[in-house]
Structure formats: C-alpha cells, structure tokens
Amino acid sequence: MAEFKGTREAFAQALIDLAETDNKIMFVSPDSLKAMRATKFAELHPEQYVEVGISEQGAVDTAAGLAAAGLLPFVGTYAGFMTMRACEQMRTFVAYPNLNVKFVGINSGLLGGEREGVTHQFYEDLGILSNIPGFTILTPADAAQTYHAVKLAAEINGPVYVRAGSGREADIYDRETPFSLDGIRILKDYGTDTLLLSSGFVLDRVLAAAELLKGQGINVMVGDVNILYGKHQEKILEAISKVTRIVTVEDHNINGGLGAYISRLVTENDPKKVKRIGLTTFGESGPAKELADAYGFSPEAIAETVVKNMK
C-alpha cells in the first residue's frame, strides 16, 4: 500500500489502486480534483476522469449515466456541496433506480472548519442520506480506514457514501486493518459500566476518555461504529446486550447520525438508556483541536458525560 496522509489522500490512493486493475473505475469531479487530492489519478488515468466544473448536480447526473452504461463512477467533493446541492439527484437519479454510484464527501464534521468555518463544515450529511432508501453509509475513523472503505465501496452493489474528513484526523488504525463488515469494531473492552460508541473522526478522543474513566474506576467498552443504518446489525446488538447504559459520540448533528441509529436499535430491540453527544448548533472557524474541545468533544467532557449518565 502506498503512503498517504489524511482521508483525502487515502481516497485518491484507493482510487488509483482500483483503476490499475479495473478500467471501469471513473472519477467525476465538480471542480474538486485538487480538493480530493486526485490530480495524480487524472494524470495516470485521463480517460477515466470526467470534469464537469462547479456543478454538483451535473456531476451526480453524469455519474448516473456512466453507471447506467456499466461503468463504476466515484463522485468526490465537499460533503455538504454534494448532499445538499445535489440531494435530489442522489435520491431520484441514483438511489431510486439503485445505480452503482459511489460518493465520497470530504470536510465532513466540525473539525474541518479551520479556514472556512460554517460554510465548509458539514454535519448534516448523514442525516440527509439516512433518509434516502438504498444508500450504504460508511464512516471510517481515520485515513487508513478511509482507504479500505473506498475499496470496499467498489465491491458493494448500489449507491455508497463514504464520509471523509479534512486531513486533520488522528491516525488510529494500522494500515493493514480491514474495514469491518460487522458495522462495529470493539477497540477497548475494560468492562460493562457503559458502552461508549464513536463514529467518524472523534474516535481518538473517545479512546482517551475511556482511559480517563478507567483511572476513576469506571470500566467501559469502546466501539467504532463504521457503517450506519446497515443491514447487518448483529454485532452492534451483541455489544448493546452486554450493558445497561450507552453513550454515543459523533462529529455530526445530534439528529440523523450515530446517536439516532443506536437509539432506534435500542428502542426496537433492547430498551435501555442512551445519551447522545453531538452538535446541536452551527460551528465556527478555528483549529480542529480547539473547536472539538469547545463543542464538547474533549476526552474530559466525554468522560464527564459518561459519569453523569451512570447516576
């Protein structure tokens, strides 16, 4: 596996590796070639690169046409520009006919707002797509998992959304660790006082919170939920069955993402208390670490929420 740093670079490298053995792979860019770090892909595979300019709706429709012709298109750009501006096209022209189009949304969440702020922070994308039937939603936690998620997306039949970041994500996984098809991977199993679930790019903070809690005599189980609203939920339900309390943490609006997914699973299968940590307001500009701390994603704040939830 070639070296890469950050989820954008991981996407580009995965796409290059896929195209080396599959000439059906296409990259459709709505003026996002540089943002997706895919310049090298266009140089190596110019006939598999389509530029439509600043037109997210046109990019999705173009990809739908390519998929209908038997090709395997990826559309990549900023998460909100894709899921908001082209929501109707993703719904009606890709999901409804169940076409084999893959979407990669970058700058998702609060942590990408160092330069652009609220206009380029996207914490509604999962809520939008979770309401569209047929989408498989992959939420890798770091660059290595993003690489494997993109390659997995090419193997899944039907529309897939891969949630990528801004390049400020902490590395958690070894490069060779595969993307879990179970929808969850248990990373810490200190005990069953609380099931602490993360989705996306705050996993490092959740793991740090688990260590703080252990120092206080509170032993939690930490799970990385990497597929939202997936068809195979057995492993998630197995983890839920071992505890009486659950806390979810996500760099997304509190509605429509991980917390909503776990709350539904719990309500329908194994009723117990769920506390959700997520965004309830718009963000602002600032360095990723400072923003995360300010909006309640510090390890200390997460640990404090777990403690309060146990009372």
Image: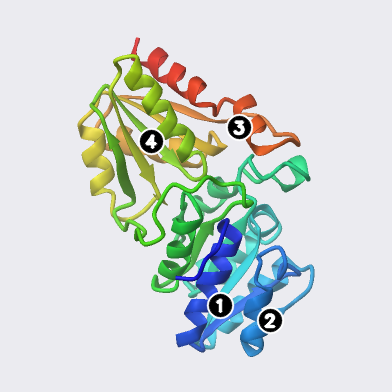
How far apart are the two marked residues, 4 and 2, measured between alpha carbons? 38 Å
Q: Could you say whether the residue bearing mark 4 is in a helix, strand or loop?
A: strand
Question: At 37% across and 26% down in the image, what residue appears?
Answer: 211
Counting from the top left corner in percent of width and height, residue 49 is at: 65, 82
Question: What residue does disc 4 label?
Answer: 197
Residue at which label 3 appears: 292
Element at label 3: helix
Query: How far is mark 1 from mark 4, CA to CA?
Result: 32 Å
Mark 4 vs 3, N-terminal side = 4
Residue 273, above or below 76: above
Residue 156: image x %, image y %? 39, 70
* Residue type at the position of mark 3: Ala
Question: Residue tagged by mark 1?
Answer: 73
**Count of labels shown?**
4
In the image shown, does 155 or 9 lie closer to the viewer?
A: 9
Q: Nearer the viewer, mark 4 or mark 3?
A: 3
Residue at image location 51% in from the left, 86% down from the top: 24
Amino acid beneath label 2: Val
Q: Residue at x 45, y 86 (%)?
A: 21
Residue position for label 2: 50
Type of the residue with mark 1: Pro
Query: Neighbour class for label 1 at 10 Å: few (<14), some, many (≥20)?
Result: many
Residue contact at pointers 2 and 3, CB within 8 angstroms: no
Viewer-side label of 2, 3? 3
Q: Quadrant of residue 47?
A: bottom right
Q: Secondary structure at mark 2?
A: strand
Relative image position of residue 118 (x, y in whole percent): 74, 40
